[in-house]
Amino acid sequence: MTNKNETIKANPILTMKRLLVIMAKENKLQLLIVCVMILLSAFANVRGSLFLQVVIDDYITPLIGQNNPDFSGLLKAILTMALIYLVGIIGTLSYNLIMVKVSEGTQKKIRDQMFDHLETLPLRYFDSRSAGDIMSHFTNDTDTLRQMISQSIPNLMMAFVTFISVFIAMFSLSIPLACFVIGSISLMFVILRVITNRSGKYFGAQQRSLGKVNGYVEEMMHGQKVVKIFNHEATAMKEFDVINEQLQESATKANATANMLMPIMMNLLNIQYVLVAIVGGLFAVYGVSALTVGMIASFLQLSRSLNGPISQISQQINFVIMALAGAERIFQLLDEESEVDDGYVTLVNVTEENGELTETTKRTGIWAWKHPHDDGSISYVRLTGDVRFEDVNFGYNDNHLVLHDINLYAEPGQKVAFVGATGAGKTTITNLINRFYDIQEGKIRYDGVNVKKIKKSSLRSSLGIVLQDTHLFTGTIKENIRYGKLDASDEEVYQAAKLSNAETFINHLPEKYDTVITGDGDGLSQGQRQLLAIARAAIADPPVMILDEATSSIDTRTESIVQSGMDRLMEGRTVFVIAHRLSTIQNSDVIMVMDHGRIIERGNHESLLAERGMYYQLYTGKVELA
């Protein structure tokens, strides 16, 4: 992955262009109106500075010494200028209000794009990043964009237009004096560039450190019970202090560099103002450019009006740099490669007559793999749940294999169990069935079809999983069960709860199936949460089930209830079971004993005991699972 500092430093223009494309895609008219309003506002500001010359040279100077001065012309000029200023005020108010709407709309669009893209990313992406750091993209990074779009971009546009307008007005008054101002402004921009180059590196580091802090806080809050159980508070605070100090250091450097910019620029502008007054006075005395008192006054006012654009640039450039750092992180997320799905075999409902399978749009309860062929023909293979591994080798990276020469089969309706120490590769095998990861060598066949040919959405809808760590969503009990089948009727929800043994405890809840649960099932026991997970899998009614240590974190009494629910769920299905408690797998048709990514023993409970190998030692307690 490209180093973020280098990316921000090398491609700020590309990042800004990409952001502007997103802004302009749905806001072309609004941005056009903003440009018009900025031009009107800048015109009013410059016209006000030039008005000073008109007042002095055309109205005040001629009236000096008159006994009965006529102020009607001056009053008319002042009213005209007031009208111009009013137009400028309306323009400023309008473009600021419009940019607020544009910024909020762009922020929403970017968040939508990020979330939609996150849903397409492979499991590998989430395994390698903390939830807090990912959340930081949706909070801190997008918030810096909002501030830049609503404030920095219009202010910089206003500064640029004002800058150009002021210099045009200056050249119309005195070319030599205008050239003198250009020279002094050029020096200021050299200083501005040096400082912003330094602060850009620090703002990038600040955004990354902020992501780390958010990730650590999220992790500690999620695991607060474990922290307290093991008296880990002091250690957690020390670890937090370390990463928080990194954030403080990068933020201090970024803001210290940025904050010195404004005083430096303002003092240079003040020096320039004095020098313009001196040089302008000398030009007037010696007749250079035919300067009048009114022209010098207007020129000084124009010079002073440069303070606004330059101070805006020096102030807003820091927000732009920080926003570009956040934008770079956002675009890196959006540029992550989506999960590749080159499958073309899909899962469809069929009817069966005289052994012939016919596709139908109605839900029949009979499923088949729809397999299109190169010659244009289509064949249907009934979904039965036959899963086979043939000479499978797999590693999370190509340099380190974690599974070696895996050969196994599970016939329809069989219960296949995996036992072995932590890290032996049990869960990895089940992840390969789902195609959460793709294998390097070998083949995995599902009802005789290579899983690489099966569309992932179809493959995963044919599989049910009950994990050790259940995850429940904020919502009602009914909604959490229905997550396994979104179009399920209430009656199907009740039947799934009854099958999983969840019905008893649900009926004791205050609102029964309409009870709202939050915080991943706070208020429910681990066993109750597990029963809901089983009900969720049951309502999906898949032909193949994966039970990944589903009872390892509950007590023995609750285990018997959960196990009863799982036994009902497993009836008539092909089941893969991962378990530490050997008592839960004794009735398995086949037990695979794994060690360091290899299957070292296989057979049923009785045959493995008779071999007196690793399984025998595990069962008799001579060796313990770690």
Image (cartoon, helix red, strand yellow):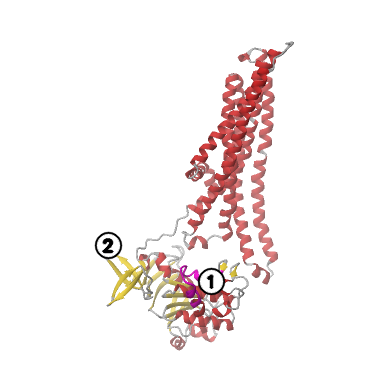
Which image quadrant is residue 135 in?
bottom right
99 sits to left or right of 406? right
Q: Which of 609 and 414 is in front in this view?
A: 414
Estimate the x, y position of residue 544 in percent, counting from the top left: 42, 75
Estimate the x, y position of residue 113 in percent, counting from the top left: 49, 53
Say whether residue 486 is magenta.
yes
Which comes sooner in the sequence, label 2 or label 1? Answer: 2
**Which kind of residue does numbered mark 2 sit on?**
Asp
Q: Nearer the viewer, residue 538 or 334?
A: 538
Estimate the x, y position of residue 529 in percent, counting from the top left: 57, 74
User: Could you say whether the residue bearing mark 2 is in a helix, strand or loop?
Assistant: loop
27 sits to left or right of 360? right
Dominant secondary structure, magenta = helix
Which image quadrant is residue 477 in?
bottom right
- The magenta span reads 476-495
Estimate the x, y position of residue 53 in percent, counting from the top left: 65, 19
Q: Mark 2 points at which residue?
A: 374
Q: In which quarter of the image is the C terminus?
A: bottom right
Q: Which of 315 and 116 is in front in this view?
A: 116
